[in-house]
Image: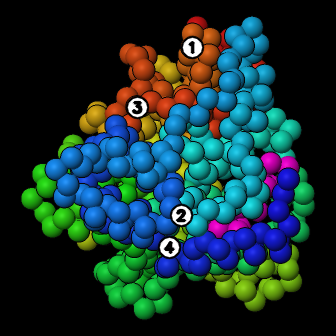
Amino acid sequence: MKFTTALYALLLSATIASAQSAQTPAGLYGDLFAQVQQQRLFPDGKTFVDAVPRSAPDVVMAEYERRRRDAQFDLKSFVLEHFEVPQPVDSGYRSDLSRDVVAHIDELWSVLTRQADRVDPYSSLLPLPQPYVVPGGRFREIYYWDSYFTMLGLEQSGRHELTLDMLANFAHLIDRYGHVPNGNRTYYLSRSQPPFFAAMVELAAARDGEQVYVRFRPQLQREYEFWMEGAGTVGEGAAHRRVVRLPDGSVLNRYWDDQATPRDESYAEDVATAAASGRRAAEVYRNLRAAAESGWDFSSRWLRDGRTLTSIRTVEIVPVDLNSLLYQLERTLARAHRVAGDSTAANTIEIAAAKRRQAMRQYLWNADEGAFGDYAWRQRTLTPHVTAATLFPLYFGIADVRQSAQVATFVQSHLLQPDGLATTMERTGQQWDAPNGWAPLQWIAIKSLRDRGQPALAQEIACRWIRENTAAFAATGKLVEKYDVSGEGAAGGGEYPLQDGFGWTNGVLRALLALYSPQDCASRLH
């Protein structure tokens, strides 16, 4: 049952009022929180931040202060007494290997769907008014950029209404907080994720018509303002929050986080990284958080030495994928203005998009490699890491014909692996590096190459990825978060074990199987 707008607004008033006033578990539980996380009371740091207190936080903390110095005090017993700790979700679903993977995905959407949230003022969950799809495993909430790739599959599965529900939830988050958080948790509010809202609007409009752009025009505008805040005043060669002004006066964007503390959900890991770095702790925390906003947490592309997490410098980098997405946001917002009859606003934002495209071609094009890369704005040079993000300018129509052909050559020579496209060329042990491949990056690559005159390479990547996914499914009955595309084994790295479910893998595979038949791939793969 869906809440009416009025009822939901009334219920929502009982919980957090805004991003600024929402307290995270670290803020609510102070020393108790730090002790739980530092002592690694739970194997996964996300467990405690998702726990719900059985009474008001101030009551819990008063009891903690009263008892914590007792000789018999046991921290874990106290936590289990005063908190409902999330348990692994067992939906009762078991894969039927007699059915094909398409039927499996179509059925799994219901398993991964959560209904409209009830409002619990003591939970870290930010309640959403409509149903939504979670990735699965430890990821119990909606995630921003994951959801676009999930929606691709929902469309192919005939679940358009669920696509619209999710889009409405993201619009709600923008209305409520001024941006889409990393996920719908209080501890994610200080950052966003790769801004795919415009692409989601475009996906819905492809089926429902151009009035979709008008409907979501206010949210498109507000998200744009979030990413561009400070663009009018930031000085040359300087940065403010998510904007960077380059030497010629152009403005591009970077990832950022409004906090410079350890992430609640990875508190112990962040404290350890900062302690080992020899740097100011706040500087390390900010960069770790900014990398979490990128979705690539973590990768050699953010590391000064390309190897060790302690050298992370995310906020010093202008990323090619982020700026491609913001170009798409500008183009989509311009279209929304034009459909709404506001040609003046449309012309203004179209000029901004053209300036961004020009700046990206100037600063983010690596002529030596024939690929797009990231720009270290303090050093005024491209970083040495060319990654699968090089394909984003093709996906969103920024690359010209020559650049598209050169990127295709680079990808085929450096990133193509036996089971799909590698994320980077570096093996660091981080999950967003080789040998791992990720569903969203496969889709961006395949669709880009398919649309930009490289259909054979697109099909090659698609068929290798489909083969890897379907072989793993046949062996295990599962689709997982990421895959080792080198052919050597299961994917690894990162701060948590490999997760199954899995939202964006399901979505991308379902969309790819609508583009490439088994016969297509049988003729391609030998």
Does the magenta run of residues contain 324?
no
Q: Nearer the viewer, mark 1 or mark 4?
A: 4
Label 1: which secondary element: helix
Which residue type carries mark 4?
Ala
Q: Is tag 4's residue or tag 2's residue first in the polypeptide sequence? A: 4
Q: Which label belongs to residue 22?
A: 4
Q: Nearer the viewer, mark 3 or mark 4?
A: 4
Q: Are marks 3 and 1 in contact (CB under 8 Å)?
A: no
Q: Which label belongs to residue 67?
A: none
201 or 81, which lies in front?
81
Label 2: which secondary element: loop
Q: Which label belongs to residue 122?
A: 2
Does the magenta run of residues contain 167?
yes
Q: Is tag 3's residue or tag 4's residue first in the polypeptide sequence? A: 4
Which residue type carries mark 1?
Thr
Residue 149 placement (x, y as % from top left): 65, 44
The residue pinned by badge 3 equals 497
The residue pinned by badge 1 equals 476
Q: Is residue 293 visible?
A: yes
